[in-house]
Amino acid sequence: MPSISVLIPLYNHARYIGETLQSVLKQTSPVDEIIVLDDGSKDNSAAVAQAALQGHANARVIRQTNRGAHNTINRLVEESRGDYLAVLNSDDAFMPTKIERCRNLLSRTPNVELLAGKVRLMDDESR
């Protein structure tokens, strides 16, 4: 099975990051690596992320001074080790079977380099 790293750029989303990480941790097919990169948040985003990932050996939170979204994503890519990368914004969430569905598609069609799926919108109350 291909390995999948989830890359999460984080900036001032303490309110959302816990739910975002739970959506990754509760996948029906566990991810191989989770990297959260806090881009100089002024709130307690990094602390919330670290607490949510405590005890998960395949997960880490990195902090840096604010460098902007593009630089943050580029660094996440450099830090990752997975065969495939899933970028998840820190105020979004994965559906529970996302990684399982991706792995199934990737194992059936090994030449695929990019997967995209439906997007569902959610409000501030996670509806």
Image: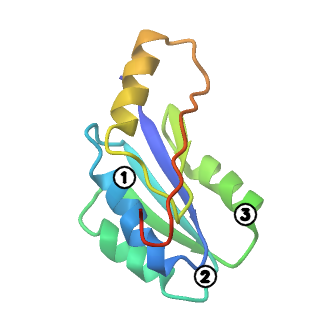
Check the image and report above or below for 122 versus 45. Answer: above
Instruction: Determine which residue is flagged by label 3.
Output: 69
Locate the N terminus and report the quarter of the image it occupies: top left
Q: Earlier in the sequence, mark 1 or mark 2?
A: 1
- Give the CA distance from mark 1 to mark 3: 21 Å
- Residue at the location (36% across, 42% down)? 32
Residue 49 is situated, as x and y percent measured from the top left of the image, at: 41, 72
Q: Earlier in the sequence, mark 1 or mark 3?
A: 1
- Residue at the location (35% across, 42% down)? 31
Instruction: Determine which residue is flagged by label 2.
Output: 41
- Residue at the location (32% across, 60% down)? 22
Amino acid at pointer 3:
Ala
Amino acid at pointer 1:
Val
Residue 104 is situated, as x and y percent measured from the top left of the image, at: 37, 21
- Give the CA distance from mark 1 to mark 2: 21 Å
How busy is the neighbourhood of tag 1: few (under 14 within 10 Å), some, or many (20 plus)?
many
Q: Tell me, yes or no, whether the two marked residues, 2 and 3, touch with CB atoms within 8 Å.
A: no
